[in-house]
Image (cartoon, grey):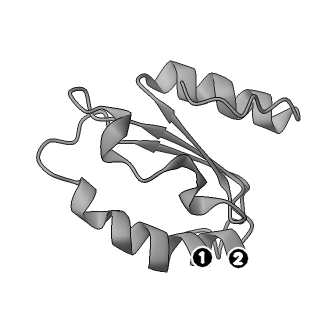
Amino acid sequence: MLQGEPCTMLLNDNSGVTGPWFDSIDWLEHVWAPQVAALGLRYVAHVLPTNDFPSVLPPANTFAGQFELQIFSTVAEAEQWLRSCRHGRSSGQVA
């Protein structure tokens, strides 16, 4: 999708995901992240599944040098952070 429609921001909403999704972190880190970063992605807002905690995610610096990843518990918070990134006011804090 990014090849056809380049963008710098992505909202990944996993709030409705059930079951173990964190097995895909290795693929995200080593395959997906380098590819999307090369296509211009700079900010990723990740909304956790309802009953998950940030501790299941890789360390915040895992994607350093590729894009900035922030973790949120609601879509509204994620959207607000992405809007601030659009205007150059990224807080650099994990929600």
Q: Is residue 55 left or right of residue 20?
A: right
The number of discs equals: 2
Question: Which residue occupies 75% across, 28% down?
Answer: 91
Q: Quadrant of residue 73?
A: top left
Residue type for callout 1: Pro
Q: Secondary structure at mark 1?
A: helix
Which quarter of the rendering shows the C terminus?
A: top right
Asked if residue 34 is positioned above or below residue 57 in the image, the reply reads below
Q: Which label is found at residue 49?
A: none
Quick one: which residue is furthest to the left in this view? 19
Residue type for callout 2: Ala
Q: Secondary structure at mark 2?
A: helix
Which residue is disc 2 drawn over?
38
Question: Which residue occupies 78% across, 36% down?
Answer: 85
Instruction: Find out whether the residues at labels 1 and 2 contact each other: C-beta distance under 8 Å.
Output: yes
Which residue is disc 1 drawn over?
34
Q: Position of residue 24 (x, y in %)?
A: 29, 65
Instruction: Name the foreground residue: 23 vs 37.
Output: 23
Question: Which residue occupies 77% across, 28% down?
Answer: 84
Q: Position of residue 44 (x, y in %)?
A: 59, 48
CA distance separating discs 1 and 2: 6 Å
Asked if residue 22 is positioned above or below residue 95 in the image, the reply reads below
Question: Which residue occupies 57% across, 30% down?
Answer: 94
